[in-house]
Image (spheres, rainbow, N blue to C red):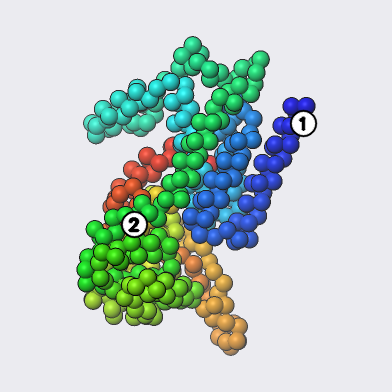
Amino acid sequence: MSGMATEGSSAANQRVVENLASRLRRRQVVGSRETALETVLVLRQVVSKARFSNIDQLVEVIRSVGRKLVEAQPKEHTVGNTVRKVLHHIREEYHTATQGTTAAASTSRSTLSIAKFVLQGQPRKQNAPPKASDETRGTLKENDPDDPDAFARTLKPVLMEAIQDVLDELETVYDNISKNAKDHIHSDEIILTIGKSSTVEAFLKSAAPYRKYTVIVADTAPSYSGHDMAQSLSSAGISTVLVPDSAIYALMSRVNKVILGAHAILANGGMFAITGSLLAATAARAHSTPVVVCSGQFKLTPQWNLYHEYGALDFADPSSVLGFEEGNLVDKVDVVNPYYDYVRPELVDAFITNDGDHPPSSVYRLIKEAYDDEDYEL
């Protein structure tokens, strides 16, 4: 009877995972935050129905789900990031449960220093609490031959809480990024942005009651998502000017600050952002205008653009740039319409995240804290 129940639950899990994978492939789920939320909900369902008798089995279940989802849409980096984040939380909860207390972990963490880091190498691996013996584990028994489900039964409520923490962080990400907006935006400033980033939109709107400022929005051809952004900001009472992308450089001498959204933040401090972001960031650098990026930490990706500018980009339909009605020209040219630009770390001054402000040079440290080293490759 229990065997049939196991098969049923694993089949249900597979259906849920395949459903999200097919939606990702067809681009029915788009946008970093939406994708991350869907991934967490699937992982929560998988963990709640999974059968496992030790932590390694559980990690392998989650990893296999992560691999399937990442393969379905490799360009949506937040899928892999969310899986890594959930694995990190699960390991933390497991260590806490096996220890019975986090006192040992917290004391070892508080005594870290640069000298120790250099001498010991990976601090998390060195200071990970040693596995407790069966006596100290109390009710948590791995690989119990008499009751194989005892481990899962004991640990699942705690794991559900850990996954809920990840979900809560995603749901409150805009509020946490926007809460200090008035410290970054000053009265009478002229701010330039590009595309329609929900994070940047929430950031600009939250400063509006405290500051009077003007936002210049580039229309972001060929998607023209800047039109929606300009309409949204204008309806919130913010003085908004919509300009063509070609005017960015000419206007940059009047701009006080460039605020961009990100699709993914890479380990070297560079980022993928909507097409036109590289143009805006390069123009800003020529005029020594600060470039600020608003992004949730769930977009931190433990990869970097290793080969060349277009290596990992996503490409959109070229007909929106050069339609087939231009018959004579279409045969003579190759049209490349990248959906994202790769913006190098030296073009960005600061990342405003839901956990404070950070320069590009410290992104590697945030990634180290957010994910476990063994999960960089799922």
Position in image of residue 95 (x %, y %): 45, 26
SS assignment at label 1: helix
Q: Amino acid at mark 2?
A: Ser
Residue pictured at 38% horizontal, 61% vertical: 202
Q: How many marks?
A: 2
Q: Is residue 140 above or below residue 9?
A: above
Residue at mark 2: 178
Distance from disc 1 to disc 2, alpha carbons, whole Å, reads 49 Å
| Mark 1: few/some/many CA within 10 Å (<14, 14-19, 20+) | few
Classify residue 341 by image quadrant. Answer: bottom left
Q: Earlier in the sequence, mark 1 or mark 2?
A: 1
**Closer to the camera in the image, 158 or 190:** 158
Image disc number at residue 4: 1
Residue pictured at 33% horizontal, 27% vertical: 106
Q: Is residue 18 above or below residue 161?
A: below
Q: Is residue 350 above or below residue 275?
A: above
Image disc number at residue 176: none
Q: Are marks 1 and 2 in contact (CB under 8 Å)?
A: no
Q: In the picture provided, is 247 more to the left or to the right than 143?
A: left
Position in image of residue 187 (x %, y %): 21, 68
Q: Nearer the viewer, mark 1 or mark 2?
A: 2
Q: Amino acid at mark 1?
A: Met
Position in image of residue 281 (x %, y %): 32, 67
Q: Is residue 359 above or below residue 91?
A: below
Residue pictured at 53% horizontal, 20% vertical: 140
Residue pictured at 43% horizontal, 26% vertical: 96
